[in-house]
Image (cartoon, rainbow, N blue to C red):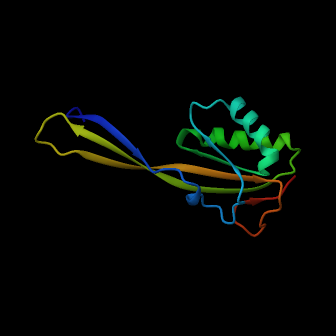
């Protein structure tokens, strides 16, 4: 790899349509957790916006999956475990481009599949038959 230097990263875009949770509420708060995000800031924003939205989706990928779960659990505890939950796991594709230092070499493209989690928390009753459903309490 000494003949290459790291180029750009192309991440699959995060879109509401691609959240793998069926029958999402029309109006929900979407919290996208990153590695550098502060848990305190994320949770306080979600708690302030939650009364108007009635549902929140926590999303994180790669190193931020654990932080995403922590945020969702704190939010459940703040609502006295009265929230319905659906959790879905999937992958997010990231392409890394490695540019050659020597002109005769070809560019290398590495596709990585990073684990991704989506956690829907809702005051409304959700479909208990859905895989990944957790009842309140």
Say if 120 sits above or below 97 in the image: below
Residue 26 picture quarter: bottom right
Percent position (x, y) of residue 6? 30, 35
- Quadrant for the N terminus in the image: top left
Say if 48 sits above or below 113 in the image: above
Say if 70 sits above or below 91 in the image: above
Query: Is there any visible trace of residue 86 in the rendered image?
Result: yes
Residue drawn at 33 percent across, 47 percent down: 110
- Of residues 17 and 65, the one nearer the viewer is 17
Say if 127 sits above or below 83 in the image: below
Q: Is residue 128 shown left or right of residue 62?
A: right
Residue lying furthest bottom: 129
Percent position (x, y) of residue 32? 61, 43
* Total numbered labels: 0
Percent position (x, y) of residue 102? 13, 35
Residue drawn at 65 percent across, 42 percent down: 68
Q: Is residue 93 shown left or right of residue 16?
A: left
Residue drawn at 76 percent across, 41 percent down: 49
Residue drawn at 48 percent across, 50 percent down: 13
Query: Is there any visible trace of residue 74 in the rendered image?
Result: no
Residue 25 picture quarter: bottom right
Percent position (x, y) of residue 17? 57, 60
């Amino acid at each position: 790899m000494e003949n290459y230097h790291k180029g750009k990263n192309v991440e699959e875009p995060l879109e509401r349509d691609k959240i793998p949770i069926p029958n999402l509420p029309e109006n929900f708060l979407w919290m996208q957790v990153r590695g550098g995000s502060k848990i305190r800031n994320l949770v306080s924003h979600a708690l302030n916006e939650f009364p108007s939205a009635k549902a929140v989706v926590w999303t994180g990928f790669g190193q931020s999956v654990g932080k995403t779960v922590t945020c969702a659990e704190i939010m459940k505890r703040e609502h006295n475990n009265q929230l319905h939950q659906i959790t879905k796991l999937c992958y997010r594709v990231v392409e890394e481009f490695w540019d050659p230092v020597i002109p005769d070499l070809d560019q290398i493209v590495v596709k990585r599949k990073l684990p991704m989690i989506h956690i829907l928390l809702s005051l409304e009753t959700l479909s208990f038959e859905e895989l990944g459903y957790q009842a309140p309490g």
